[in-house]
Amino acid sequence: GVRSPFSSFAFQSNPSRIKSRSMHAMSNLVDTLELNNQSNANGTIGVNGCTKKAVPKSYSVSADGSVSVLTPLQMGRHELYENIPFTAVFGMQKKERNLSRAFASYAADLDIIEADQKAVATTQQHLSHQDLEKRHSQAELIMMDQLELDNVMVTTPLIFAILVATMSQFLVGYNTGVMNAPENVVLTPHSTGIWGLAVAAFAVGGPFGANIAGNLADTRGRRGALLINTWLFLLGGLIQTLAIDMFSIIIARFIIGFASGFSSVLVPIYLGELAPPTLRGMLGTLTQFALVLGILVSDLLAFPLASPLKWRILFSVTAIVAIIQLFCAPWLLETPRWLLNRDTNSRKARYIIKQLRGFRTYEEVETEVGHFVSAIQAQTMKQHQNQNANNAPPTNHNNSNQKKQTDNNSNSNNNTTTIMELFQDKSVRLLVISCLVLQMSQQLCGINAVFYYSTSFFEGVIDNPLDGTTIVGGVNVLATYVALLLMDVVGRRTLILWSSGGMFVCCIFIVLSLLKYFPNIVALIAVNLYVSFFEIGLGPIPWLIVAEMFDAKYVATAMSASCQLNWACNFIVGITFPYMNNCLGPYSFVPFATVLLFAFIFAAIWLPETQGTTPEELQAELIRKNSTTVYHNLNIHESADSSLAINMEWRHAMEQLKKEEEEAMQSGNYNYGFQPIERGSIPSNRSNTPPTSDWQSVVSGVKQ
């Protein structure tokens, strides 16, 4: 057996300590990998007409005597499930890649140790340093390729569920920008104040929706909460479309804002619990793109619809998209994590996992269920540890890096810590202040003044203000993609400095252009650069940095305080900018420039740098975590060779499954995951009776 690299001791397994619950796992220790159930008497197996030598199954024995029979790939996916939070967050791809790289290197270390031990046993000589380096490099690349397979192998049910869920984020973006163009045509005449209140009502409803989303998702299920959210969008959209006065518009905007806050919390959770770990960062990016595309679509539709006769059609898009979402509700599958959290024996969860992952065998489904259950238990354990830490007397941490010992992105729901307790803890006081300053800067920099009122701002600057508004919306989409690339290579603090500094310079050029020191085209260019600089720093970083700064026990409280402050500042900008524009005229961006200057100074002097955990730190954590575990038959090369045929067969099976699903949809017989599983569809568990094989000698190394 091979112990975790650099561990202090190797656990010598004792069969008498193996618990009865592990007997089924023990019965598999001497099994060989069966492909297509074709086995020959000479120890070879058949795959698509080819023969290959049987490969012993890899397994591990932990210090409590429990046995885990997983392939190296399954071990890696297990670690990803436990360490990647069940939420889709923009900018998480770097953590996913770092963790995959860390496990690949860790598994390659185990592989070369076992290979060296085999060489000593057979040839009485160690492998050369060159051979070890070559084998390590190859094993690491093989493992990375296998872990990244989830990024390309996605099923039709998963794709449809993602598309239906992201419609909600599209509506968030659409309703952020839809009030921009029709100010002069909707229920005129009306005052500047009443229109500003209608725009800002969106930000009033947001925090209420965000607060209730978590509890409702826990009690009604993720799918049920999403449907409730869709009905709220439909209600708000209908009231806004059929509005008879500005008061009706204000009520509708409040309801839509409530639904938007609800969606901003719920959709990332739903997508994160539905998708495999290596897809969650990409889906976080998808939600952000859905939002900015919603803003762009609202700008484009304003060209034909922002008129006295057609503005109701512009507002009806919210209701129309919500109705489409309701018709597509059968594609919204409940998340396996929510089902398994309520009942680990849930048959519905297993059926949905089978649909989402495209599995064909019961063993594959149960392995995936084990990943989910283990991750849920790990998060529960962290939550209990954090609660105990909150109840313990405060300590003075001299080394802020000690905070990295817990997973900063844990989905802890502990709400016992208050914001005042955060301020009283000297070790995190600066982090709390930094977090709140960034949230205030994100909104008070004036970005939503552009998305709410850019059409009125561009009046007199360019011939058709809608042209400028649409260009800004398009640049916003492109800048979001640039931000995704930059967050992988540049530090958070550096991006904040570039973002706030660039926006400050842009504000100066906007003011000077409005004062006629530069041509009007300079103002248009400056506004677009202003939006671009926002998207690379002040847009995504304030949310991402909360999880990277705080211990898991503080994340929930810090995130809640950040959310409330962000919506409050959003409301302030929404309701005050029309007055600022009327009173200050060309100087309307001076207050925003002041905020940006303060944000730049604060980031330069006090903001700590956070770039997440490096692959080396993650690998060290894996070594510490598994220091008492002994691994057997962990041969990445042989495992990859034997699984190559399986992967090819699986790809063909996925293509056949997709074809069958398309035919079933066309015939109207498609099963969307809610039909009960027939009793005979899942085979019964194997008997726990010990096999006749001498498995004790396999574990202990002593022949009976």
Image (cartoon, grey):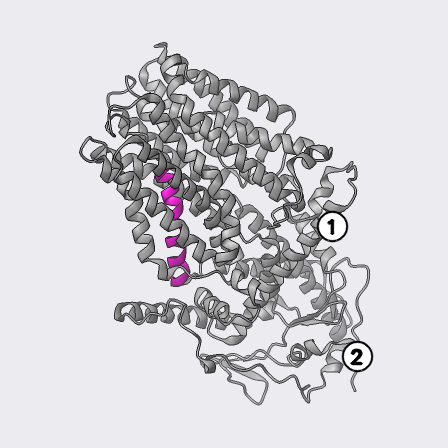
Residue at the left extreme? 309
Say left or right for 520 vs 30. left
Q: Which residue is mark 1?
A: 388
* Amino acid type assigned to the residue bearing label 1 in the image: Asn
Image height check: is 270 above or below 363? Answer: above
- Measured from the top left, where is residue 287 in percent x and y? 43, 46
Question: Is 452 situated above or below 481?
Answer: above
Is label 2 in a helix, a strand or a loop?
A: helix
Answer few, some or many: residues within 10 Å of disc 1's Cα (few below 14, many 20 plus, some between 14 and 19): few
Extent of the magenta region: 156-175
In the rendered structure, find residue 299 and report the number of the disc placed on it. none
Q: Quadrant of the N terminus?
A: bottom right
> Left of 128 or right of it: where is 73?
left
Tell me the quadrant of the picture where the C terminus can be found.
bottom right
Residue underneath mark 2: 16
Picture coordinates of residue 598, whole percent (x, y)? 56, 20
Is residue 162 rendered magenta in the image? yes
Question: Which tag is nearer the camera, tag 2 or tag 1?
Answer: 1
Q: Nearer the viewer, residue 43 or 427?
A: 427
Residue nearer the viewer, 360 or 105: 360
Question: Is residue 342 rendered to the left or right of residue 296?
Answer: right
- In the rendering, at what x and y percent does residue 573 appear? 44, 25
Q: For the point 33% across and 53% down, which residue is it?
A: 325
Kindly state the secondary structure of the residue where label 1 is placed.
helix
Can the viewer see residue 497? Answer: yes
Residue at image coords 59%, 83%:
686
| Depth check, front residue: 600 or 153 | 600
Crowdedness of circle 2 by 10 Å Cα count: few (<14), some, many (20+)?
few
Q: Is residue 281 visible?
A: no
Residue type, numbered disc 2: Ser
* Percent position of residue 5, x then y: 74, 59
